[in-house]
Structure formats: C-alpha cells, structure tokens
Amino acid sequence: MRAVIQRVISASCTVEDTVTGSIDTGFMVLLGIEDADTQEDLEWLAQKIAAMRVFGDENGLMNKSLADIEGNILLISQFTLFASTKKGNRPGFTRAARPDHAIPLYESMVKRLSALLNKQIQTGIFGADMKISLVNDGPVTITIDTKNKE
C-alpha cells in the first residue's frame, strides 16, 4: 500500500456535483493498493496514519496527532500511486490492484481508521471520477509505502 498524507485545513471530494466527503483540519489521504497488499499492510499503515504527529503543539513543534487535535480524515482511493513510468511517456498501472482485491481493503481501511480515531472517516467513491479540493497546511505532505517502511 502507498499513501500520500497531506496535512490540511480543509479538504473535500465531489463526484458529479455531489460532495461525497468533506473535512476541516486533519489529513487528506490518497491510498493506493496493489495486488500484494494484505491485511497486515493495512493494519501497519492505519496505525501509522492515526498516530502520526505532524500537528503543531503550543511551541509550534510537530508533536500532536490527529487524536490530539480531534482532526479528521478524507480517504481517497488512488490507483495511480502505482504508476510505472519506466518505459515511454504513458504510465502503466499493472501493479495497481484490481477492484475485487482493492475495494475490500479500501473499505477495511475506512473501518480501521474509524475505529482507531473513534470517528467517521470521510471518503470519495472508489473508481469514480473525483474532484478533490484541499488547502494544504504547511505544506506538510508525507508518503508511506508499506513495502518500504522508512
């Protein structure tokens, strides 16, 4: 799994002129799932996202987590995070998981993050043409790959 986590002041997802998810302060997370991903990858990544301390404390240091600030998450499925650009100019997406594998993991991630943060997770619609709006705070943008745990 790959995630791009952006600390935001606000973020929203719109599909066909309907807002499907909207948050104030928190994380806008783009989530890419590949065929090799497992429930173990999901658990590790969910824990990382929920506990990540990148929000300012009283001294302006990044010491607070989502729970500390009562922040929210907008979670968006993003198969293009597994784009291969090695050959030519048209990206290939063969590493991205097919919907029959990706959708259950995406839905499990929504449930797991909701349980960890004890709140509803806002989402887009898997496979839809989504329009994402956000105000990045900082900017703070962090990428995580469960197969390369740095």
Image (spheres, rainbow, N blue to C red):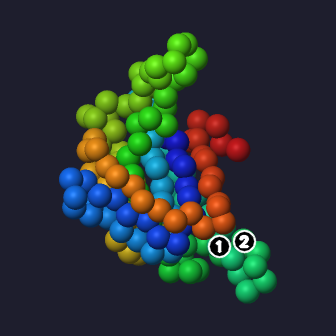
Residue at the (32%, 64%) spot, across then down? 21
Of 105 and 123, nearer the camera is 123
Q: Which amino acid type is shown beneath numbered disc 2?
A: Met
Quadrant into which the C terminus falls: top right
How many circles with numbers are drawn on the protein? 2
Q: Residues within 10 Å of mark 1 (few under 14, many from 20)?
A: many
As helix, strand or loop, the secondary structure at mark 2 comes to strand
Q: Residues within 10 Å of mark 2 (few under 14, many from 20)?
A: few
Coordinates of residue 101 in the picture (x, y in percent): 31, 35
SS label for mark 1: strand
User: Who comes first in sequence, dot 1 or dot 2?
Assistant: 1
In x, y percent, where is residue 53? Answer: 66, 68
Question: Residue 145 appears at what percent x and percent y?
Answer: 58, 41
Label at residue 5: none
Q: Residue furthest top?
A: 87
**Which residue does the image show at 29% across and 58% down from the upper left?**
14
Rendered image: mark on residue 55 = 1
Q: Which quadrant of the structure image shows residue 72?
A: bottom left
Quarter-of-image position of residue 51: bottom right
Corner quadrant of residue 24: bottom left
Instruction: Say which residue appears at 26% left-offset and 34% top-offset.
Output: 100
Of 131 and 96, which appears nearest the observer?
Answer: 131
Q: Tell me the amino acid under the disc marked 1.
A: Phe
23 relative position to 69: left or right:
left
Marks 1,2: beta carbons within 8 A: yes
x and y, in percent, of residue 99 in the image: 28, 35
Residue 47 visible within the image: no
Compared to 60, does 45 lie above or below? above
* Image mark for residue 62: 2
